Image: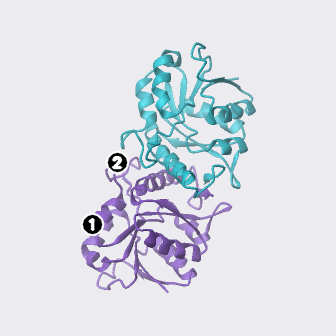
Chain colours: A purple, B cyan
Amino acid sequence: MTTVSILGAGNMGPAIANIVEKSGNTAELFDSNDTDKAVTGEIVVLAVPYPAVREVIAQRGEQFDGKVVVDITNPLNFETFDSLVVPAESSATAEVAAALPTSKVLKAFNTTFAATLTSGTVGDQPATVLIAGDDAGAKAQLAEIVTGGGLTAIDAGALNRARELEALGFLQLTLAASEKIDWTGGFALKA
Amino acid sequence: MTTVSILGAGNMGPAIANIVEKSGNTAELFDSNDTDKAVTGEIVVLAVPYPAVREVIAQRGEQFDGKVVVDITNPLNFETFDSLVVPAESSATAEVAAALPTSKVLKAFNTTFAATLTSGTVGDQPATVLIAGDDAGAKAQLAEIVTGGGLTAIDAGALNRARELEALGFLQLTLAASEKIDWTGGFALKA
C-alpha cells in the first residue's frame, strides 16, 4: 500500500487522487489552505499550476527528501498561449529536479486532460500516462499505480524527454483552447 | 485539380502520393535520380530525410518560387536518438522557411508514421495530419487534399508550432524505436 500525497485540489489533483484510490492505494489531497499539514506519502504529486511550483518547493522542499516527486505542469505563457516560459532547451521538470536534488523527480500526467483521467479513455483508446524520469524504480512504482487505476502507463524515457512531453502538452492545450479538439479528447496513444 | 510534386521515394513519399491520388488530385513522385526533372506541382512535398533537405533546396530552390512547400522532416540526431539537431528554440521548418522566402512553407506529415497514412487509421481513430504554417490559404489547400484522401487534417497553428510538432514526432519515433509502440500505431488525435 502506497500513500500518494497530491498537492493541488484543482481539476487535476482530484482526478489523480481518483486513480490512486481505484488502484487500491491511498491518496492524500492538499489544497492551498493545507500549508501547515506535512506530506506523508512516498510519492508526491505537484498538481499545482507551474507558477506555484516554486512556492511549494520553497515551503515544503525538505519534506520531499528521498521521495518520488511527480511534476505534472505545462509551463505555458498563458498570456500569449504561444510559447513556454521555461528555456527552450530545458523543461519545468528539469527545474524541479535541480531544486530537489535528493528527490526522484518524474514527469507525468501533463499530456492527459483531467476528463480523460476520469473517464479512463481518449476516444476508443485507454488514456495513456506518459512517464519520463531518470529513476527506473520510481517510474515503475508510478506506472503500477496508473495501471492499477485502469489507465495505460508508458515509460517515455529519461528526464530529458520531459521537454518533449511539455511540447506535447502545450500543443494539446493550444488545440483545445482554439476548439480544434474537445477537453474530453486529445492525443491518444495506440501501442 | 492540383498537382503535388513529392521529392523522395522512401516510405513516406509513396504513402503521401497515395493520399493525393485518393483525393482525386495528381501526384508526381521524384526519386534521387530525378535531379534533372523540374517539379511542376503547385504543392511540393519535401519527403527526404532532414539531412538531404539542404541539398534539395540548393538544387531546386528556384523551382519552389511561389509554391506551397511542405516539410515533413523529423530532424533527429539518429546517432544518439536523444535530441534534435536543430536549435532548441527553432525547427527544421523554420530553417526551410528562411531558405525559401518566396515559398509558402508548411509543416505536416511528421507526426504520422507511413503505415498510418496508408491504413488511414491509428487504432480506431482516423489518422490525423497536423498542419502548421503562416499561410492560411496554403494550409487549407493541403487540408483539402488530406481530407479528400480519407484522413483527418487539423490546423495546428502558425509556423512556430512546427517546433512542437517536431517534438511530438521525435517522441513518437523514440517510443517506436524502443518498442513501446508499434510502427503501425502512434499518437492518434481524438477531437
Front residue of A70/A74: it is A70
Q: Amino acid at mark 1?
A: Ala
Q: Residue at x 42, y 24 (%)?
A: B99
Q: Amino acid at mark 2?
A: Ala
Above or below: residue B2 compared with residue A191: above
Q: Is residue A86 left or right of residue B41?
A: left
Above or below: residue B5 compared with residue A145: above
Above or below: residue B90 compared with residue A117: above
Q: Element type at marker 2? A: loop
Question: Is residue B105 visible to the viewer in this orientation of the structure?
Answer: yes
> Do the residues at pointers 1 and 2 share their chain?
yes
Q: Residue at x 59, y 34 (%)?
A: B140
Above or below: residue B165 compared with residue A91: above
Horizontal and vertical percent position of residue A161: 43, 55
Q: Residues within 10 Å of mark 1 (few under 14, many from 20)?
A: some
- Numbered badge on residue A88: 2
- Which sits earlier in the primary sequence, circle 1 or circle 2? 2
Q: Residue at x 43, y 75 (%)?
A: A9
Horizontal and vertical percent position of residue A166: 43, 55
Picture quadrant where residue B92 is located: top left
Front residue of B39/B132: it is B39
- Distance CA(mark 1)–CA(mark 2): 18 Å
Horizontal and vertical percent position of residue A178: 51, 49
Q: Element type at marker 1? A: helix
Front residue of A96/A170: it is A96
Q: Is residue A43 left or right of residue B69?
A: left
- Numbered badge on residue A180: none
Horizontal and vertical percent position of residue B157: 49, 42
Q: Are marks 1 and 2 in contact (CB under 8 Å)?
A: no
Mark 2 falls within which chain?
A
Mark 1 falls within which chain?
A
Residue at which label 1 appears: A99
